[in-house]
Image (cartoon, helix red, strand yellow):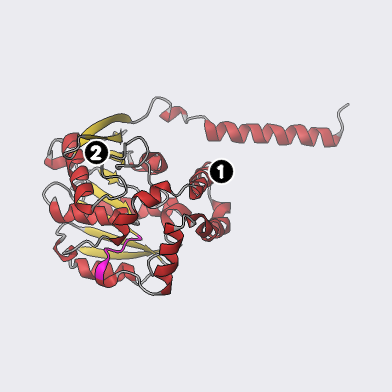
């Protein structure tokens, strides 16, 4: 006869095995579902830009596509797959490895990328994917430094997109963070010590982990391991010092999201950016630090979906 303690151990291993199976095994409904992958040669250097296109599982006429450009920490297309799964129920979602990131090569200008160059990359990519279809003009989402690229696309390609969403972004210039906080951030970046800031995110997630599924927590942990690698941050360090001029001329609907405890760009930067963009922009404060899309991915996804449906989609909400 087995002892109660041995039965407890067996039960614990059985529960752990079941949990791992649930996390690693695809849902039967999604077993045959996956993205289209490919490359598009962009810009004058003909650099192949790698992408994943998550086609709508249940297409709904009038639902505009969403393009994720990534952001600090979440810079590769792989980091956005959880969001693609959630949002591609009734619309296309495009994930892209920008130059120097993921499967896309660095190109001849590595370490000296410009907003103008990356703007052309994104425009050529969306033109190739949707061939100028007016019913498939996407919403461009850029987080942290990638929000500058989204704003630049909004300035130069108003007739090719439907909206812009920035997350924890400053366009630079007059409302860029200054003083000791900016000096501290620049030191972290240039010395490759961004990993030290991970404590802020770990603490924030720990306080709300009880309400997140294990699969989401494992996904977040996987992202945090990237704090140990600063290469992607350094490749885009030049973009941090670039300023997006003329944001008041972004004519498409624009949503400015900003973390309520952002230490990279102060919380006041969010409403200041929305005010600078003008009448077509709205601002929403998100609970959390700079990368609030990591600390509460569900809330982030809901906010994006609700805003796009209310302000961009031509289908009934």
Which residue range is magenta in the image? Answer: 168-173
Judge left or right: residue 174 versus residue 168.
left
Q: CA distance from mark 1 to mark 2?
A: 31 Å
Numbered marks: total: 2
Residue 7 x %, y %:
80, 33
Quarter of image, res 80: top left
- SS for callout 2: loop
Other residues around mark 1 within 10 Å, as few (<14) / some (14–19) / many (≥20): some
Whether residue 129 is situated above or below residue 239 in the rendered picture: above
What kind of element bears circle 1? helix
Confirm whether the magenta stretch covers residue 71.
no
Q: Is residue 203 above or below residue 275?
A: above
Which residue shows up at 32% across the image and 33% down it?
Answer: 57
Residue on which disc 2 sits: 60
What residue sits right under mark 1 in the picture?
A: 214
Q: Is residue 127 left or right of residue 96?
A: left
Between disc 1 and disc 2, the foreground one is 1
- Residue 94 occupies quadrant: top left
**What's the magenta bit mostly, secondary-structure-wise?**
loop
**Residue 185: x and y, percent?**
43, 64
Point out the tag, 1 or 2, that comes first from the N-terminus. Answer: 2
At x 53%, y 46%, the residue is 221
Pointers 1 and 2 in contact (C-beta within 8 Å): no
Callout 2: few (<14), some (14-19), or many (20+) C-alpha neighbours within 10 Å? few
Residue at (56, 53) in percent of width and height: 209
């Amino acid at each position: 006869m087995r002892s109660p303690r041995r039965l407890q151990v067996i039960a614990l291993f059985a529960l752990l095995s079941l949990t791992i199976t649930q996390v690693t095994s695809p849902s039967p409904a999604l077993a045959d579902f996956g993205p289209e992958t490919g490359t598009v040669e962009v810009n004058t250097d003909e650099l192949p830009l790698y992408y994943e296109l998550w086609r709508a599982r249940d297409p709904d006429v009038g639902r505009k596509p969403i393009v994720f450009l990534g952001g600090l920490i979440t810079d590769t297309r792989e980091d956005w797959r959880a969001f693609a799964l959630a949002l591609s129920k009734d619309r296309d979602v495009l994930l892209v490895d920008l130059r120097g990131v993921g499967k896309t090569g660095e190109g001849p200008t590595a370490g000296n990328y410009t907003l103008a160059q990356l703007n052309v990359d994104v425009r050529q990519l969306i033109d190739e994917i949707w061939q100028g279809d007016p019913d498939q003009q996407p919403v461009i989402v850029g987080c942290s430094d990638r929000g500058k690229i989204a704003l630049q696309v909004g300035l130069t390609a108003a007739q090719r997109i439907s909206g812009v969403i920035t997350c924890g972004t400053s366009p630079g210039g007059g409302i860029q963070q200054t003083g000791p906080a900016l000096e501290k951030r620049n030191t972290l970046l240039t010395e490759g010590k961004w990993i030290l800031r991970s404590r802020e995110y770990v603490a924030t997630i720990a306080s709300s982990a009880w309400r997140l599924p294990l699969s989401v927590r494992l996904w977040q942990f996987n992202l945090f391991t990237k704090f140990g690698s600063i290469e992607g941050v350094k490749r885009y360090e030049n973009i941090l010092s670039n300023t997006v001029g003329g944001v008041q001329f972004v004519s498409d609907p624009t949503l400015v999201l900003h973390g309520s405890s952002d230490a990279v760009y102060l919380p006041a930067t969010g409403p200041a950016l929305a005010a600078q963009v003008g009448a077509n922009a709205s601002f929403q404060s998100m609970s959390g630090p700079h990368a609030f899309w990591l600390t509460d991915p569900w809330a982030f996804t809901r906010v994006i979906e609700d805003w796009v449906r209310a302000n961009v989609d031509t289908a009934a909400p």
